Image (cartoon, helix red, strand yellow):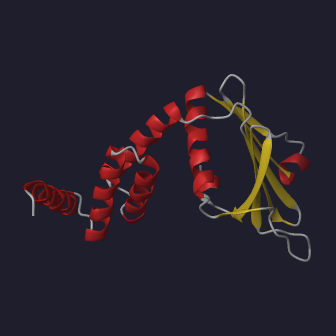
Amino acid sequence: MSRVSVSSCSSRADDIEYFRQELSLDLARAQLLRRAEKLQEKGQVQQALQYYREVLTAYPNCREAQMNVEMIKRNNSEYVSIPDDAELSFYSEESAHETQFQRLKRLPCGRTEFVAENDVAMSFNQGPVKFRLAKAQSDQLWSEILEALEAQDGLFEGRAPVDADGFSSYTDITAKFHGEEQHFYGHRGTPLEEI
């Protein structure tokens, strides 16, 4: 065995032991955290992000993983190309008498407009809720949205299925980029909706 491989093995074992002792991680999560850091060093941030999230699922207070996720997100927002016409809408049926609609739309100035409305509020003559995000918040939001769409965690392509009464227990999601629409659906509470 060469000296290089011995020292790298020692370094790997030392890192994992450090994560186990100082961060109180189990062996599997300590190995994932080490692997994530190495992937991040190599510029493979999307893979690293998946490993960090796996660690955070088991150890939500792991500061090391939290900081690295935040760093990746900050850096991602700087180089992710966000289409000027980006738009995302969510439609769900809470019951036969209540529907909800939410839309995020990227504006030419880089800000994002959020609109939310539902049947109950409209029946009381309450208009839709509207607000705009600042450009930095907008960039961060769209970076996370694009990442979630790429991962498709909990999403299925196509339109949401409906039962015999025409009711759907899914959220219908429409994404529009560069003038093209894509349709997805998922159970309520998908990572995309959580964003």
Q: Going 33% across and 62% down the picture, which residue do you hit?
A: 32
User: Foreground residue, 96 or 146?
Assistant: 146
Where does the image place residue 139, in percent across and percent down from the top left? 58, 33
Instruction: Specify the quadrant of the image occupied by residue 93.
Output: bottom right
Q: Is residue 5 above or below residue 127?
A: below
Q: Going 88% across and 47% down the picture, which residue do you hit?
A: 122
Is residue 86 visible from the viewing direction of this image?
yes
User: Foreground residue, 118 or 184?
Assistant: 184
**Horizontal arrangement in the rendering, residue 82 relative to residue 74 (left or right):** right
Q: Quadrant of the N terminus?
A: bottom left
Q: Going 14% across and 58% down the picture, which residue do you hit?
A: 5
Instruction: Specify the quadrant of the image occupied by residue 105.
Output: top right
**Horizontal arrangement in the rendering, residue 105 relative to residue 33 (left or right):** right
Q: Residue furthest top?
A: 109
**Horizontal arrangement in the rendering, residue 46 relative to residue 136 (left or right):** left
Where does the image place residue 48, in percent across and percent down from the top left? 40, 52
Where does the image place residue 188, in percent across and percent down from the top left? 68, 63
